[in-house]
Amino acid sequence: MAKSILITGASGGIGSEIAIQASQKGYKVGLLDLNKEVLEEVESKIPNSVALPTDVTDEKSVAETLKKFGETPSALVNCAGIVRFGSLLEQEIKDFKDVIEVNLLGSFIVGCAVAKLMKEKGEGNIVNISSISGGKHPAIHSGAYAAAKAGLVMLSEQMSLEWGKLGIRVNAVSPGFIDAGMSAPHYRDDAERKKREAMVPMQRIGTANDIAKVVMFLLSDDSSYVHGENILVDGGVMNSVLANIGRS
């Protein structure tokens, strides 16, 4: 049976890599993003893909995109995300709201719209891309990002509880230090890169490929009994706090 997938944030480093690997696995790929120019550039490089400029925070825009795609997707990956840096005391309310709306509300809007279609089909698979910042260790000066990603983890769990009986599997993936997308600028400075590498037990920064491979596993039958999980893909950094404390 032909497979199809919708990927939000598809013009970004992680989103585009997921799109590439999905295409290689035989999926028809719907590329969703607000950045039309970059999205069309990504489309030109990925066989069997279609650019679908979409505002994930707008229900009407999402509905029009699903209509254009023309079929019930087998899978959805919510990867759209933004960050507005700055301390909480200096954070503009608009910036805080924008991050919540794209990262959390957008995943809810697209997730529900697609789940309604999947419900009629009796099957589907959803993966939400969160972050290690959405766990117990928020990054300072990251505005609403940690709160939004933490909300997305809990939203994923709630989706899994409500939609499992509909035949829809839902999981989350939380990337760690990844040299892609919004995080890529951190690694252009050699000193900063080496400092971060030293914090990771595996002694390297992750790649978009590392994330995409885990997503593809969750979309495959090999993970058919994995449901409601948040999978950390971080090289062990979330477990490394005590490893950075020296012993005499």
Image (spheres, helix red, strand yellow):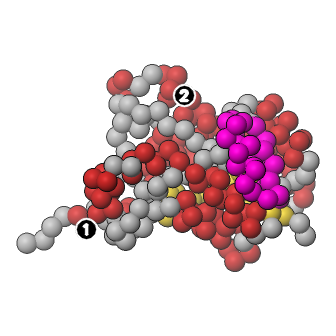
Residue found at x 83% / y 58%: 48
Element type at mark 1? helix
Question: Disc count in the image?
Answer: 2
**Quarter assignment of residue 56:** top right
Q: Three-letter amino acid code at disc 2?
A: Lys
- Give above or below for 155 relative to 243: above
> Looking at the figure, which quarter contains the C terminus?
bottom left
Residue found at x 47% / y 33%: 84
Image: magenta residue range: 28-53
Give yes or no for residue 29 being in the magenta stretch: yes
> Looking at the figure, which quarter contains the N terminus?
bottom right
Residue found at x 85% / y 43%: 66
Q: Is residue 248 left or right of residue 72?
A: left
Please tell me how crowded label 1 is: few (under 14), some (14-19), or many (20+) other residues with Cα within 10 Å: few
Instruction: Give the residue at mark 1.
Output: 243
Element type at mark 2? helix
Instruction: Give the residue at mark 2.
Output: 97
Q: CA distance from mark 1 to mark 2?
A: 36 Å
The percent coordinates of residue 81 (x first, y second) are: 58, 42
Residue 111 makes an appearance in the image:
no
Q: Three-letter amino acid code at disc 1?
A: Ala
Q: Is residue 80 left or right of residue 199?
A: right
**Quarter assignment of residue 22:** bottom right
Instruction: Pick the residue in front: 212 or 95.
Output: 212
Q: Is residue 122 left or right of residue 179?
A: right
Residue found at x 23% / y 64%: 244
Residue 195 makes an appearance in the image:
yes
- Give above or below for 240 relative to 177: below
Q: Is residue 219 left or right of residue 73?
A: left
Please tell me how crowded label 2 is: few (under 14), some (14-19), or many (20+) other residues with Cα within 10 Å: some
Instruction: Pick the residue in front: 41 or 180.
Output: 41
**Quarter assignment of residue 171:** bottom right
